[in-house]
Amino acid sequence: DPASPEEKLVLEGIETFTNFEKRVERLDKELRNFDNGARQLGSSAALLLAASRLRERLVRLLFIFRDNAANLFPRRIARQSKETLVNPNIMDRRGKAHSEAVKFQAFIAEDGLATEAIPQELDGFARDLRMLLKSLNDFPEFRDDAVNSSIHAFAAELEYRASCLTEYKGYFRLASVQQYVHGLTAEIGSHIDVVASNLAMFIDIGVPTIQLSQQYAAANLSNLATFGTIFSGVTATLLQLSYDHTNTKLAVSVNAFWFSSLVFSVAAIATSLLGLAWTQAIHRSPNHRVPWWVLTWIRRSPLVLLVNAVLFFFVGLILVTYTISNNMVTPILITIFATVTSIGLASSLCWIVSERFVSIHHQGHIWLEDLMLETIRHITAPIRTITHRIYSGFGGLPLYVRRPPPARLFERTTDDEPVQSAAPTSCGVSIVSPSSLEDMVSIVSEGTPDEQDEARRSRARERFKRAVRTVISMQSYPRTYGSQSLDWMLHPSPASRTPSIGGKVIRRYGLSTLSQKLQNLECTEDISPHQALVRDLQFSPDGKYLATASWDKTACIFKVAEPSADNHFLYHERGFTEQILWSACGGHVLTRSPRGIKIWTKDGVCLKTIRRPHIVQFLQWVPLGDMSVLSVEGSEIVKLVPSEKVLETYNCGRVQLRRIVVTSDGHRIIGIGPIGEAPNGLHPSRPTRVEKRIIGNQVPLFQDVSDVKLARNNTHLLFSFGDQSPPQLWKMDLVGGRGRASRNCARLTFRHAFLSPVSFEYVATTFGGKNDQFILCAGKSGEILIWDRESANLLHHIYPKDPDQDLTCITCNSLAGDPFAFAVGGHDGSIRIWST
């Protein structure tokens, strides 16, 4: 037998958790591989620690989400033993578990609900990710902007969610909050996939790159140590021959220079070996955590010491030649060769040191050669200025050269005409040869490509290529939207519990009768009063009139019995008409544009225009009021009267309200909207991932809620979503609050979702029938569905006849019980009325 809609939702919820579990296991596997690969690198202690903490954190997070899923789907998902919180593969040297795992076990034993710890664990997960990223960035040999941006986005998302979840402390036993936590698994799982992919890339590319760089540095130090050993042996051998000769000052100077050379070479050997051991050590500090003088001595001093040893050796060698030689040829040659060699060594050493200084000081944006040329130009600028003035002082005498003009610059039109330039010079000035001298032309310096500009363009092209690669990698980062709600099918409210067998039979018979009656629905009216899409429409309280609002800056009121005659058009001079609303008595109509509110009579007479300083998101009449209006403006609800006087302002804090409904007694306002920032001021990584919340009961919603409707008896709420998620019905009960009067607190309980046999994009939903016993929904592609409110059974499905029939809104004539009637608005400005 095919699975019921409720069973399908449960299976989808189980599959969502199973996918999350697989993603966590994959990340744990990559962390193990990352741990093994990072051990081959020097200074990898921080990486190993970050990987270990992440693995511990993943164990606790998986335990929390499994416990939450077990609460939602009992007997389907088994709970996990508390002993599994301590990973036997992650212990300290004494074989004990880390303190955070022990504290988490104690918290569960005391509180009994693991979900209460999810804000702290998500925040800790963000800290561990930032620690891992910081450890990766400690290796300058391998950098990837895509890795940095993806991990930063994940950490920011975790911190935002953790901050928002702190407001639900003590409410994690509620089914709505548990479902919201379950919905986070899809979003967190997508981020986990990105982190796992980045770790795999680091293992495949980063580890070999860093290892090769460290091996190269170690090989350099090893070569320096080898050369220093050989050189010190040569110096020590010569010292044995010259040590006993101290009878002259030259002999003493030779010993002094060679002993100094031996000291420098031995120091170079010791420093090289020390640097070699330090470079390959796992627990060495990163470069930015080491004092500059220590890092400079270990890495740079061996080469300087060896160069000094060679220079002192050459000086001693020159002095030796003057001491033992009987002619001047040998000393002079040795002096020349040693001097040239010493100057070359010293110059090369200065160049290397200057290159490093310029690179660090200018952060690689300029080369040493460019800096030297710029310095030379700056120094010689006064000389060139004086030379130019002297040259200009001779009166601009022309200097000519007897040579034929270049063919590419000059072109002779006739044999008797003078020569004229056909192209500008590098200075942008055309050259005209003297007419009296046919074979004479002015000297022109031909322009050549600037090497510096070419180098800059080459570097700019490389930077552009890297930026393009980074953007492509970031766009390949998976984008996750809100997952379809599972709707707590295993936690029905008391009002939705299974009735008795007799009740089932009676209910089934009634639904069958309703379904047969709805089969007679047909489109009785099809009119097009607007030139643009219909944004809103509503029947009057007595059911005799239908009011519509369109983006063609007009609203329309016409009689339902005669829709083609006696229409009243309401014109708006500014902005689109977004909403239209009948008053409770049916004598007035309220219309909304982005920054304006208009009050009309049902005959189309404008009574008042109210201008607002902020964008008006939604309007609502105040029940039992004297023409008072509630205007939703950002996070505030402003109560106005036609005289534009503000009576009251209700602030909803961080929630940016989209829609509100008011109970018939005017005591309660239920609003929906996203939360732009967390309590600590954090924002989500993407605007589409902001938290959504029902104001009035502080219920979190994972999907993007687009509209809310309230039943006329104030007992049920209908929520619509802006994607393919089905509408949801919630029950509102009045209960007694702590320290308050009885039945003064509203509690929202989820009832069920209205599922469709086909997948399409929902655009609008509403209650229908005399007692709001129906739920009507319009699809963007023209689908119209009607469900029974109490059982969520699909009673009728109207398929679109025209493939271009895009619907935008729907409303039901509540007083037309028999015949049953409703109206829909289209994207082309058409309005269709259906009735039985």
Image (tube, grey):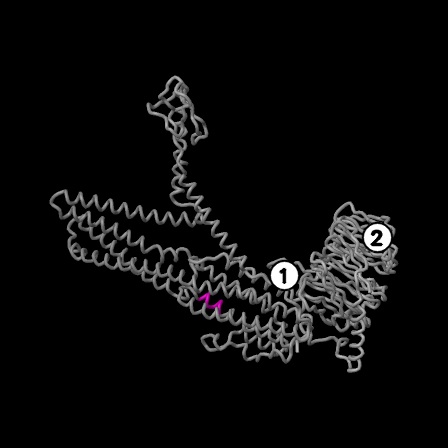
Q: Residue reaching furthest top? A: 436
Indicate which label's residue lies in the foreground, 2 or 1: 2
Q: Quadrant of the N terminus?
A: bottom right
On the question of residue 648 being in view, the answer is no
Crowd class of label 1 (few under 14; some 14 to 19; many from 20; radius 10 Å): many
Q: Position of residue 625 (x, y in %)?
A: 86, 58
- The residue where tag 2 is placed is 564
Q: Position of residue 333 (x, y in %)?
A: 18, 44
Q: Nearer the viewer, residue 420 or 86?
A: 420
Based on the picture, tell me whether residue 680 belongs to the magenta stretch: no
On the question of residue 245 being in view, the answer is yes
Residue located 40% across and 40% down the image: 451
Q: Nearer the viewer, residue 760 or 706?
A: 760
Q: Earlier in the sequence, mark 2 or mark 1?
A: 2
Q: Position of residue 218 (x, y in %)?
A: 34, 60
- The residue where tag 1 is placed is 689
Q: Is residue 122 left or right of residue 769?
A: left
Q: Amino acid at mark 2?
A: Ser
Q: Is residue 170 left or right of residue 279?
A: right
Say what secondary structure mark 2 lies in: loop
> For the stretch drawn in magenta, what is the main secondary structure?
helix
Span of residues in magenta: 45-51
Q: Nearer the viewer, residue 328 or 751?
A: 751
Q: Amino acid at mark 1?
A: Arg
